[in-house]
Amino acid sequence: MGIREQLTDPWGFVAGGLSGGLAAAVAAALGPTALAAIPVGLGVAAVVYGVKVGVGALTDRDRSGPATDLPMPARGSPADVWLRRAELAVRTLHEQTESPRDAMTRSQIGDIDDQAAETLGDLRRLASQVASVEAAAVRIDIVRLRAEEQRLAASVREAADPELRAERERAVRSVSEQLEVYGRLLVARDTLVARMQTTAIGLEGLIARLAEVLALAATAGGVDTTAQRIGDLTSDLDGMQAGLRETEALSRKVLAQGGSVTSGS
C-alpha cells in the first residue's frame, strides 16, 4: 500500500479518532471546561493519524524491497506471470506467519517469512535478467541474418577464386556466430523462465504445507511436534535460493559470451 492508500485507509481514521476521543475525555476530566478538551483531542487524533500513515508507508516500502531501475519483463509475459504468482505467494506466507496467537509459534516460523522475502528478491533479479536477455535478442535481426546466411553460402559455392571464396567464408562465419548468439540467448531466457516457474510453484506449495504446520501446532498446543516440518520448509527455501542464484550465474555467463561475440561480429 502506497502513501495515497495509507491516507485513505479507514483504520487510520479509526485509530486517530479513538486516540483523540480518549485524550479529549482525559482532558475534560482534568481541565476546568469541556471546551478546552476539544483542541487536545483533535491534536492527538491528528498526530496518531499522521504516525499511522507514515509508519504504514515505510513498512510497505521496506517489505516491497528497495526501489531499483532494473528492467522488468513485459506485462503478461511468462516471466511476468510467474513473478506475480510468486509475489502473491510470499504475501500469503507473510500473512500466515503473522496469524498464530501464540508468540512462540510466531517466532519459530518467522524465519520462513524472512526467507520467502529473500527468495522473492532473488526471483526479481532473475526476472530482470529475463528482460535483459529478451532485449538483447530483439536487437538481433534473425530474419535478415538467416536470409543472409543462405545467400552467402550460395555465393561461396559460386566463387571460383580461392581468395574470394575465403573472404565469403569469413562472412558466413560472422553471420553464423550471430545466429549462435541468438540461440544462446533463447536458451538462457527459457532456462531463467523455467527456474522462475519452479520457484513460484514451490512458494505456492509452501502455503499449503505451512497451513498444515500451523494446524498441527494449534492442536498440539505448541510447535515442538512440528519442528521437523518447519525445518523442512526452511530447507526447501534454502534450496530455492540456491537454485535461483545458480541459474542467475549461468545466465550471466551466457550473456557475457553473447556480448563478446556480438561486439566482434
Image: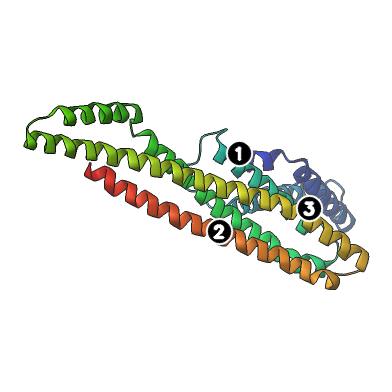
Q: Residue at x 65, y 43 (%)?
A: 85
Few, some or many residues within 10 Å of mark 2 (<14, 14–19, 20+): some
Question: Nearer the observer, disc 3 or disc 2?
Answer: 2
The mark that comes first in sequence, 1 or 3, is 1
Q: Amino acid at mark 2?
A: Gly
- Quarter-wise, where is residue 218 in the image? bottom right
Q: Quadrant of the C terminus?
A: top left
Q: Nearer the viewer, residue 42 or 204?
A: 204
Q: Which mark is residue 81?
A: 1
User: CB atoms at circles 3 and 2 under 8 Å apart?
Assistant: no
**Mark 3 to mark 2 CA distance (whole Å):** 22 Å
Q: Amino acid at mark 1?
A: Val
Q: Amino acid at mark 3?
A: Ala
Q: Is residue 89 left or right of residue 246?
A: right
The mark that comes first in sequence, 1 or 2, is 1
Q: Return the x and y of residue 105 as percentages of the image width and height.
A: 81, 67
Task: Say above or below: 142 vs 69.
Answer: above
Q: Which mark is residue 243?
A: 2
Q: Residue furthest bottom?
A: 224
Q: Quadrant of the N terminus?
A: top right
Q: Which residue is mark 3?
A: 208
Q: Nearer the viewer, residue 210 or 102?
A: 210
Question: Nearer the observer, disc 1 or disc 2?
Answer: 2
Q: Residue at x 81, y 52 (%)?
A: 19
Q: Residue at x 78, y 45 (%)?
A: 11
